[in-house]
Image (spheres, rainbow, N blue to C red):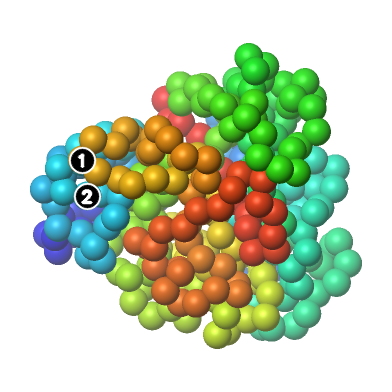
């Protein structure tokens, strides 16, 4: 596995060569994020990292042990672009017109923040899975991209109706066009592959939680994104800050499970841990799920795009 990880790290170097830096890193106090991940021409721009493809044959030894890349499960993870940060409160408000966040917000030094302008670089929270689908398609349409999600045969969220406050069979039956060039949530396999970053760390970028994650021991609320160390693929906050919704339904994973996860169940996968969770929740291999209507102050998301 160490040899495998070294090879992946080489891939990461090439992937980062295609990335763009719009938000500042943890070494820069300005920490400004752009409010768009693509130009009107559809080209991937700031803040997105190209994650290398992977052919997983189910014989690898993973450190830490994976519950997604299990023995005998063959997976093809196509290359994709992932935002290097969780969707921020400013980005969400720009697209959706309002910010539903409820968690207290802090800067990287632990100073509590108030007011729209000050909290803009904290991750949006109090987001459910349905909200994330609406955001992805709304942003895709705004940027003249092909929306990925369809509900009842429609891709325009304005035709979907009000986001349900309880489980809704029509919304639960949403479909995803993985060939579309618009924004979407990562699959759980994509998320874990990206979180590992071509490395063998317990958390996304380190074995030391405090170097890469905001969690219950070192914060009382969300923190500005990109203020901890990034992982090997150049992604921040894959451990901690807010839970991140994935596309997949939650269920038992076996060698026969499809690339997009379980075919049954209602709950949707969340990964990465959060500002009010234990360190264990922030591990790259930790699994979690919630009902798709579940909205709470520790849940947010990040977006990806299929690479062409």
Residue farthest to the right, as pictured: 115
Q: Quadrant of the C terminus?
A: top left
Sequence-wise, the earlier of marks 2 and 1 is 2
Q: Quadrant of residue 284?
A: bottom left
Element type where label 2 sits in the image: loop
Residue 164 got which mark?
none
Q: Residue at x 75, y 44 (%)?
A: 165
Taking depth in this image into account, of 288 and 60 the one nearest to the observer is 288
Residue 159 in the image: state x and y as whole percent.
77, 21
Task: Say above or below: 63 vs 173.
Answer: below
Q: Position of residue 240 (x, y in %)?
A: 53, 68
Tell me the residue at 88%/67% (across/down): 115
Give the quadrant of residue 139: top right
Quadrant of the image containing the N terminus: bottom left
In the image, 202: left or right of 302?
left
User: Left or right: where does residue 305 sit relative to residue 118?
Assistant: left
The residue pinned by badge 2 equals 70
Q: Name the secondary structure under disc 1.
A: loop
Q: Give the left or right position of residue 155, taking residue 199 as reference.
A: right
On the question of residue 10 being in view, the answer is no
Residue 255, visible in the rendered structure: yes
Q: As rendered, which of 72 and 228 lies closer to the eye?
A: 72
Looking at the image, residue 256 lies above or below residue 92: above
Instruction: Please tell me which residue is depicted at 75% across the width and 83% down the height of the picture.
Output: 111
Of 85 and 131, the residue lying toward us: 131
Residue 46 location, x and y as percent?
58, 45
Q: Which residue is mark 1?
A: 255
The correct choice, above or below, for 139 with respect to 222 in the image is above
Q: Position of residue 23 (x, y in %)?
A: 62, 57
Circles 2 and 1 in contact, beta carbons < 8 Å: yes
Q: Residues within 10 Å of mark 1 (few under 14, many from 20)?
A: some
């Amino acid at each position: 596995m160490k040899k495998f990880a070294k090879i992946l790290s080489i891939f990461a170097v090439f992937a980062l060569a295609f990335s763009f830096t719009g938000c500042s890193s943890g070494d820069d106090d300005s920490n400004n994020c752009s409010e768009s991940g693509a130009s009107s021409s559809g080209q991937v721009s700031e803040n997105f990292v190209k994650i290398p493809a992977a052919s997983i044959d189910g014989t690898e030894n993973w450190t830490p042990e994976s519950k997604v890349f299990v023995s005998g499960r063959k997976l093809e993870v196509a290359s994709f672009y992932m935002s290097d940060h969780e969707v921020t409160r400013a980005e969400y408000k720009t697209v959706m017109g309002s910010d539903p966040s409820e968690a207290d917000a802090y800067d990287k030094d632990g100073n509590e923040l108030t007011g729209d302008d000050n909290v803009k670089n904290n991750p949006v929270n109090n987001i459910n899975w349905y909200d994330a689908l609406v955001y992805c398609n709304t942003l895709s349409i705004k940027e003249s991209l092909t929306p990925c999600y369809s509900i009842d045969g429609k891709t325009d969220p304005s035709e979907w109706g009000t986001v349900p406050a309880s489980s809704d069979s029509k919304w639960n039956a949403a479909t995803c066009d993985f060939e579309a060039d618009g924004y979407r949530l990562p699959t759980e396999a994509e998320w874990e592959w990206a979180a590992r970053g071509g490395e063998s760390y317990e958390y996304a970028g380190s074995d030391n939680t405090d170097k890469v994650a905001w969690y219950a021991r070192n914060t009382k609320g969300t923190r500005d994104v990109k203020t901890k160390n990034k992982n090997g693929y150049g992604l921040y906050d894959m451990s901690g800050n807010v839970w991140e919704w994935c596309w997949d339904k939650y269920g038992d994973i076996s060698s026969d499970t499809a690339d997009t996860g379980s075919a049954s169940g209602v709950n949707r996968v969340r990964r990465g841990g959060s500002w009010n969770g234990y360190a264990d929740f922030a591990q790259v291999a930790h699994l979690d799920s919630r009902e798709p209507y579940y909205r709470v102050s520790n849940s947010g998301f990040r977006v990806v795009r299929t690479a062409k």
